[in-house]
Image: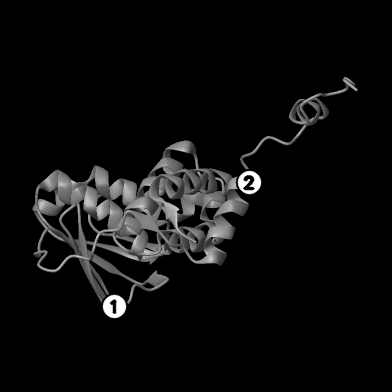
Amino acid sequence: MSYALNEVEATAKRAARGAGYDWGLAEEAAKATRWLCAQGLDGAAVLARLLEAGFAAELEAHVPQGIEGDWLADAPLCPLATGAALSDCAARLRDMPMAIGPVAQPAMILPFAATAARQLGACVTVAGEGFQAVTDGAALHCEGTLPDAAARLSICAAGSLANPNPGRTRAEPAEAAWAALNRFAHKTYAPATEESRLLGAGAGLSDND
């Protein structure tokens, strides 16, 4: 199935909220998922795998413990919270590269690297074992295979974007990933009451026969 990017963004936002992220990070997740899909990557699958990891329940254990120096941790870092912090600290990349890790679903870091690139007015390169991605903020070029987890990522304000991925205006998420997002999104819906069921039925208790 093919979906408009607006629909992907809306579903991703509800899914992230249903998984336990606050509305602020849910909005970040939605924008990041849309950006990945616009670059030709299956952002829905990336987000679905992240939400199934359950980081939102104990998010404090999966965020950088300080913004000075490299962001290295014992537990896997959540790319949503870590990416949001990266966007806030983008100016640091002017002076030196940054190392972060381990990181779950490192593909989800790429939209935040794009935000940093726009802030800096320069390309940002994200590299890990087996892959390297360069973004100028609007487009992306990725070499290698993006893994489900990365022991360490290097992020720097460098690189050039000679052969970007073709842009997409619609997304074609994996069926299982799309179903997973909708399961999480369903948790944000208010349970039906007797009153709402009657209103939804149209005539309610009246009999017009």
- Mark earlier in primary sequence (1, 2): 1
Q: Compare residues 43 and 58 and report the one nearer the observer.
A: 43
| Badge 1: residue crowd in 10 Å (few <14, some 14–19, many ≥20) | some
Q: Which mark, by number, is residue 186?
A: 2
Q: Are discs 1 and 2 less than 8 Å apart at CB?
A: no
Question: Is label 2 in a helix, a strand or a loop?
Answer: helix
Residue 115, percent from left and from top: 23, 48
Q: Compare residues 139 and 150 and report the one nearer the observer.
A: 139
Q: Which mark, by number, is residue 79?
A: none
Residue 64 in view here? no
Closer to the observer: label 1 or label 2?
2
Picture quadrant of residue 196: top right
Q: Amino acid at mark 2?
A: His
Residue 15, percent from left and from top: 54, 48
Q: CA distance from mark 1 to mark 2?
A: 36 Å
Residue 77, percent from left and from top: 41, 59
Residue 45 in view here? yes
Q: Residue at x 20, y 49 (%)?
A: 116
In the rendered view, does 179 fall on the left or right side of 201?
left
Q: Residue at x 42, y 41 (%)?
A: 27
Q: Residue at x 24, y 55 (%)?
A: 113
Q: Residue at x 58, y 45 (%)?
A: 18
Q: Quick one: quadrant of the C terminus?
A: top right
Q: Which mark, by number, is residue 129?
A: 1
Q: Amino acid at mark 1?
A: Glu
| Badge 2: residue crowd in 10 Å (few <14, some 14–19, many ≥20) | some
Question: Is label 1 in a helix, a strand or a loop?
Answer: loop
Q: Residue furthest front?
A: 209
